[in-house]
Amino acid sequence: MEIVFKMKTANKRGFRTSFCAAAFAVASACASDGARWIWYPGDFETHHAEVVQARRLEWGGYTPVIWPQYRAYPIVRFSKTVNLAEPEEIDVWVDGQGSFRFPWRREGNMTENHATFKLPAGKATLAFVVQNHATFPSLYVRGKTVKSDGTWSADWLDAAPRAAGSSPLFTDPAQVPSVWRLATEPKKAVSQRRTARGLLADFGEETFGYVVFGNVTGKGRVKVVYGESEKEALSDAPGQADVWEMLDLQASSACTQSVSRAFRHIHVIPQSGDVDVASLSMLYEYLPLEYKGSFRCDDARVNKIWDVSARTLHLSTREFFLDGIKRDRWVWSGDAYQSFLMNYYLFADNESVKRTLWALRGKDPVVRHINTIVDYSFYWLVAVHDYYLYSGDEAFVKAIWPRMKTMLDFVFARCRADGMYVHKPGDWTFVDWAPKPLVNTEGPVAVIQMLFARALESAADCARLAGDADAARDLSSRMAELRAKVVPTFWSEERGALVHALDRNGRQSAQLTKYANMFGLFYGYFDAARRERAVANGILGKDVLPIQTPYMRFYELEALCSIGRQADVLKEIRSYWGGMLDLGATSFWELYNPTETGDAIYAMYGRPFGRSLCHAWGASPIYLLGRYYLGVEPTKPGFAAYRVKPSLGGLKWMEGDVPTPSGPIHVRMDAASVEVTGNGGEGELVLPNGRTTRIPPRGKQRIAL
Amino acid sequence: MEIVFKMKTANKRGFRTSFCAAAFAVASACASDGARWIWYPGDFETHHAEVVQARRLEWGGYTPVIWPQYRAYPIVRFSKTVNLAEPEEIDVWVDGQGSFRFPWRREGNMTENHATFKLPAGKATLAFVVQNHATFPSLYVRGKTVKSDGTWSADWLDAAPRAAGSSPLFTDPAQVPSVWRLATEPKKAVSQRRTARGLLADFGEETFGYVVFGNVTGKGRVKVVYGESEKEALSDAPGQADVWEMLDLQASSACTQSVSRAFRHIHVIPQSGDVDVASLSMLYEYLPLEYKGSFRCDDARVNKIWDVSARTLHLSTREFFLDGIKRDRWVWSGDAYQSFLMNYYLFADNESVKRTLWALRGKDPVVRHINTIVDYSFYWLVAVHDYYLYSGDEAFVKAIWPRMKTMLDFVFARCRADGMYVHKPGDWTFVDWAPKPLVNTEGPVAVIQMLFARALESAADCARLAGDADAARDLSSRMAELRAKVVPTFWSEERGALVHALDRNGRQSAQLTKYANMFGLFYGYFDAARRERAVANGILGKDVLPIQTPYMRFYELEALCSIGRQADVLKEIRSYWGGMLDLGATSFWELYNPTETGDAIYAMYGRPFGRSLCHAWGASPIYLLGRYYLGVEPTKPGFAAYRVKPSLGGLKWMEGDVPTPSGPIHVRMDAASVEVTGNGGEGELVLPNGRTTRIPPRGKQRIAL
């Protein structure tokens, strides 16, 4: 048995450079051969969630997240049992320090980040222990037949063995997964001018990237002010612009930032030294994504709204689905939940959904709700199941199930004895920016119970998929019990709607809110009679508290669509989103109030430029138009079966694509006909008159109306 | 109200260098003024435990620890409420990214690692949030009256507010606590010679430090082989020397290692290129410690044993109390427990004990026993209480109590219903290197129950100190219940001793082991009659399994001392430790077997150089001589009261010091008299005839025998 052990000759201390250079030659020679970097599942995302969310600048400094952060396992064992027909040479790379355990050999651990081993023929379990105390351990193995991928196992003493995590973004041994920079391309400013104190550039639209300082002379410190509006970029006095930083520049240096940021306008103001910057450009940074969904109609304003929504979603779909790209740059579960839904109708990018779900959940133990918000934990649980429905990706459900279970254990430990969830110290019950007494009540809030029940239902299904029958049974029975309590507890026969909550004495609150009645509608809590009254009194009624956020407005418009009021919703889309366009928006905002004028449109949270002008939840027309106008939704996982229920809502014609794992479903409709091209699955077409017909799996179908 | 906010002008990206340089000037001007770097308690130790223990080299590669590792909190909030008589300027440094929350001001977070703030007069709570995702967050604040120290509070969402952690080693703002290098001084080799393949140097004794490669010509890779013996340094073939690494050297570079290692002999063997090394020296690296304890007697061999023990303990007392300095370099609870005891009679260095206790315990959740070893968890709990007894440091007990509690919760969750601890899957029951079936039994092991009861007793006392009366009550009652079961369960009237264990059916095992009877003796489980029989049959009996390790031999010799057999123990010390000296030992070993000859003395674990020749547990004469010959022990915390029960054990005379928080207790004894100098506390002198007398608090006392 011949054993070959070659050590690379690079300098150990400076390994990063030499390692990349050496590995690149190998990678170029044999790209995309199936091997991937692997890690303990979730650790890549846990690590990068820390890195990405640590970049928030506010009031001139870094602002850490306001929820617990988790860290990756510092030591992981990767293993795989192989049975080789003949001896095989493997190349092994580690990000960290590696130590191998081959059954036939003890001497020869890795002191370098790359080594070559010759494996003898026969059956054996290969095991590599990798330690990385700064980021997270990962491994890359490539031989003729032996390749690191999701068929390997990852474990360590405090982590159960699981299928290793990986990403199609990290298939190159030269690109270690602990260092992650998205794609970039150079872009020029559309205009620039000298101000009284510096240089101001306009990039023409909301964007994201690294500022490139051109024709720098002298040396010194500059203040860089990031503006989503020109006004913001010009307002750098204390308490004005939210996001600015100090950079030291000098003529000979590269003069590009190390951290990318969001802006449309850049204002560079020299602070010290004799530095001068004569021109500004940028490296636009983005996640390469395919635009698989589409929408076009006869109304140019609606088409423009769809386009700007798509741009808004793309700008905020990055390492993870972020909320607002300039200010927070954080991953919020409720915000991400809506991005997931939009994504299914635009990019259908599974990887971004999976990364975000891992990032949101973090690791064990669970000590707070996700983002500290009760409803956000429930949305997270529902989102896993939604993802399964849209993607059919059973492997992911199995991989993340253990974290769903510990999340649920946390929730159950805080539950009331009757199974309802009531606000606890340390919780933030968000729902909407409703007045606090409405959400942090001392009794149960109706909409929270409905989200909870939906989360239990989703989790029960995931438990079944993961083969945890006991948990599935327990979750289903908890769900049924809780669900059965909602209407008897919160329905007011007198008001003809669900009330918002109970008070501490168990009495129904006087306040009606739309939340309970909207979610009651989605989740099917009403019989026909109650349904009609809930809409009339609980959603459209006059003494109902109005929706506060575009975030909750998403669900309101969805509720209206779900009861066939597409025409009303289209008017709302044209005026609310169209209103932002009229004010020059190039991406959609965190909040828009048609009554505001002047600089008030930039203000929020008591700060003059506190409002995010590129906020993922602003992109909801993507989802609404795909889901309720083109009318496409999966009814079996991965669109193995689906329903198309198109509705023009006042448009003369519309057409578009909804992506599915087996290709797009194309829909075209006008007053006279509907055309649908299926994806190969079992499709059902629901016509405006209520008649249903089967969509043949292949080819374009045209049905006259 | 004037607010001054000055930003330093250093380059942000290269902050470390500029920050250090700038901070140094400040530090030099106002050293030791009471300010310290502060962190979340335990995080400094958790981080450095990872760093230090990741340095183990074995078989040519890094070998990660075999127990779960924890990581520091990445975000911590430091706060303090101050009431200033007049405005005050403070200098603030952060290791990481800082964000301040002063109630009167929102703008002006820190983008640099240093800033200056002017605080207004009056009462306010200062709060700094620091994030550090690579190491751990820490803060340093210095004003005229406002200074960061243990009076500040540290917390974050998933960590309860606690008194901030700090160390007297980190009082200089220029020295961030995430970067920690011990003191060094240059040392020359005592000899060096060319070998067939390279250059071999001998440093004359076991040592620790950075190899300095002198007169390097050319450029290339060398193999550096670390030998505790010359034979080991010369044996670099695969499967031979344990610890070696490859380094790239060239003429112009500094040619010093970045990681320090243990060795006596260094063998440098060129591997590639035209590199040549013409001379070797080193930077000796050590923890500066004061030798507070001392021992001298008429027997030169015993004096030499004490000196080499002291050197052995000093070499292994570093960032933490390590086990063996060449091979493991790890922190093992059982090994550390003995180092603590030796330390109390030599350095009395509280900081090293506290650091090691934090490092061993790590953070929550507890998923395995400490080092995965059942008995090591119990030793850890006892060690906290021992430390309190020797130091009187109540603040530490309060700080670590929450981690004791979660450690105990872990133990209780695995306990048998009757309160006994029985080996569980995932546990390693060590006790001694006894045959596995003896320790991993399916029934309870006697010595484990006794350690458990002692741990409960210690923890109960700590709970009381920490103000957790409920826990104290619960622990005391568990302890009493368990303790009451030991003799009825394990005493064999027939054998006249405690048996080792019960089998799975609850029947007493046939095997007698010394462990049960030794610990029964220490912990007072026997009445006078049983005591005598336990010694005769269970410790000195002929069919008792012999002790396997010098580690367990520590307790055996202690047991013998505790029953007055100092003369026998002294003979054993002279032959066992003296035997190592006769073989040229310059530090004491992991194992010594007088029957071994030739190269066998270096072998262990089936490896030719697997034995550690500088192992902390080899230094136990320090403890035995101080505790049982000079005879000094605390009877109240911090030696507020103590007992001196000297015993010559066959020596003609002896004298020495035992350190206490209020100064050394000096003892001198010969056949004619005992002289004791007290430390100011309540001392009791027990004379050889059993008579006791009070030691006056001040001045030398001489009592004729």
Image (spheres, coloured by chain):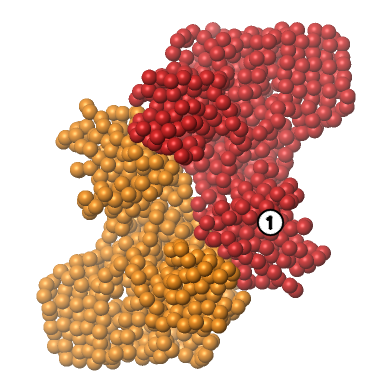
Chain colours: A orange, B red
Q: Quadrant of residue A607?
A: bottom right
| Quarter containing the C terminus of chain A | bottom left
| Residue indicated by mark 1 | B141
State whether residue A245 appears in this view: no
Which residue is painted at 67% across and 48% down in the image?
B172
Residue B221 rendering spot, x and y as whole percentages: 38, 34
Q: Is residue B620 left or right of residue B216?
A: right
Location of residue B542 with respect to A140 vertically, above or below: above
Crowdedness near tag 1: few (<14), some (14–19) or many (≥20) residues, C-alpha within 10 Å: many
Q: Is residue A143 left or right of residue B154?
A: left
Give B215 or A615, whichever is nearer the viewer: B215
Q: How many marks?
A: 1
Residue A313 rendering spot, x and y as whole percentages: 36, 74
Q: Is residue B658 left or right of residue B508?
A: right
Q: Residue furthest left?
A: A699
Residue A126 rendering spot, x and y as whole percentages: 29, 37
| Dot 1: element | strand
Which residue is painted at 39% across and 36% down in the image?
B219
State whether residue A702 appears in this view: yes
Chain that bears disc 1 = B
Which residue is painted at 53% across and 66% down in the image?
A219
Location of residue A474 with respect to B403 vertically, above or below: below
Q: Quadrant of residue B606?
A: top left
Give B228 or B340, whichever is nearer the viewer: B228
Give B265 or B390, whichever is nearer the viewer: B265
Which residue is painted at 79% across and 10% down in the image?
B670
Residue A283 rendering spot, x and y as whole percentages: 38, 69
Amino acid type indicated by mark 1: Val
